[in-house]
Image (spheres, rainbow, N blue to C red):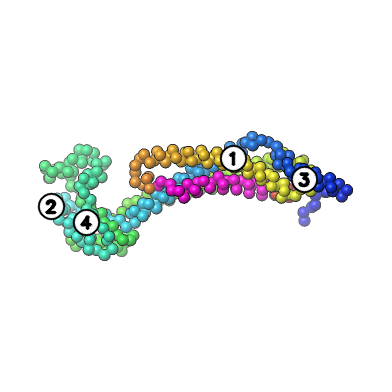
Amino acid sequence: MRRKRPGLPPVLGRGVARGWRKLSGGGEKALMPQPRFAGPMPWVIAIMVALTVIAAAAGLALRNTARAAAAELSGGVTVQIVEANPDERSRQTNLALAALAAVPGVSSVREVPQDELDRLIAPWLGAEGEQAAADANDPAAAIPVPALIDARLTGPATAPRLATVRATLHRVAPSARIDAQASWLRPVFGAIASLQWFALTLIVLLAGALAAAALLAARTALGNNRDTIEIVHLLGGTDAQIARIFQRSIGFDAAGGGALGLAAGLAAVLILGRRFAGLEAGLVGAGALGWSDWLVLALVPLAGVGLAMLTARLSVLRALRKML
């Protein structure tokens, strides 16, 4: 059973009440007289919040990228007509286009133009290789480039639907190769998922570090003001009232540090976003943050303040229970 703290004689009751009202009115200054931002805790919280904002922005951008890529490629099917003879390749391509258009569940069929194919293979073959691939003067010396057909299904490109498309095309175009576009990016999706888990783990670790900083600050202030706290107890102050003073003070420091951290984190996110936008890559562009993502980032310092105040309150209450 918890022991009661020693009290003052009853004859001093009125004086005690007046003294406690005075101390409770300026209790925060009496218990924690240091000025704002005097200690390291606000700056530590600012660093933690900035890193958390950057990690959260990275996780949200990766999520947007994965969703956009999955939506774009879920029903995509690529058909390659791998035939060295140009005339036979053209014949099979026309037959494959007609056969695909008649397959149930195929919403659109398009043959990729030659100039678009040239742009696709240019990074791999170079300018001379591209010219050799499209050499019209000497077809025998030209590099055979497969014809490419882009087909879109009304739903996901599942294995049974791909088997139906293959069976239909192989009857009219034996040289056809059918692949689901999403399968090409399966390793990329796996890497994106791993990076998302890494960002989430980093956020959890930063939250733990922020809570540890608040705990250390509360314990330090509690130890430095132990005598004052004993006097407050004698004046009739409760543990909850004392914990509220520490909680409020640490909350102010956390709010200031959180605001600085949010500003620094958002600045870093904007700079990195402009850098990646300059790449003009499809997957990178799909990861742009929306208004809801920015709202989530704005809530990071609020969550940090709440965590710091909760940690301070619980740690102070636990320490006060052990004091006489």
Circle 3 Cα neighbour tier, 10 Å, few/some/many (<14 / 14–19 / ≥20): some
The residue where tag 3 is placed is 21
Q: Nearer the viewer, mark 2 or mark 3?
A: 3
SS class of the residue under badge 1?
Answer: helix
Label annotation for residue 87: 2
Q: In whole angstroms, how far apart are the C-alphas of marks 3 and 1? A: 29 Å
Q: Viewed as shown, does residue 139 lie left or right of 115?
A: left
The residue where tag 1 is placed is 256
Please report the bounds of the magenta region as a residue range. 287-316
SS class of the residue under badge 2?
Answer: helix
Do the residues bearing badges 4 and 2 touch, measured as CB atoms within 8 Å? no
Q: Nearer the viewer, mark 2 or mark 1?
A: 1
Q: Is residue 187 magenta?
A: no
The residue where tag 4 is placed is 176
Q: Position of residue 236 (x, y in %)?
A: 79, 48
SS class of the residue under badge 3?
Answer: helix
Q: In the figure, residue 260 lies in which quadrant?
A: top right
Which amino acid, by three-letter code, is at mark 2?
A: Asp
In this view, which residue lies farthest toward the right?
11
Which amino acid, by three-letter code, is at mark 4?
A: Ala
Do the residues bearing badges 3 and 1 touch, measured as CB atoms within 8 Å? no
The residue under the point 80% across, 52% down is: 4
Quadrant placement of the N terminus = bottom right
Q: Nearer the viewer, mark 4 or mark 3?
A: 3
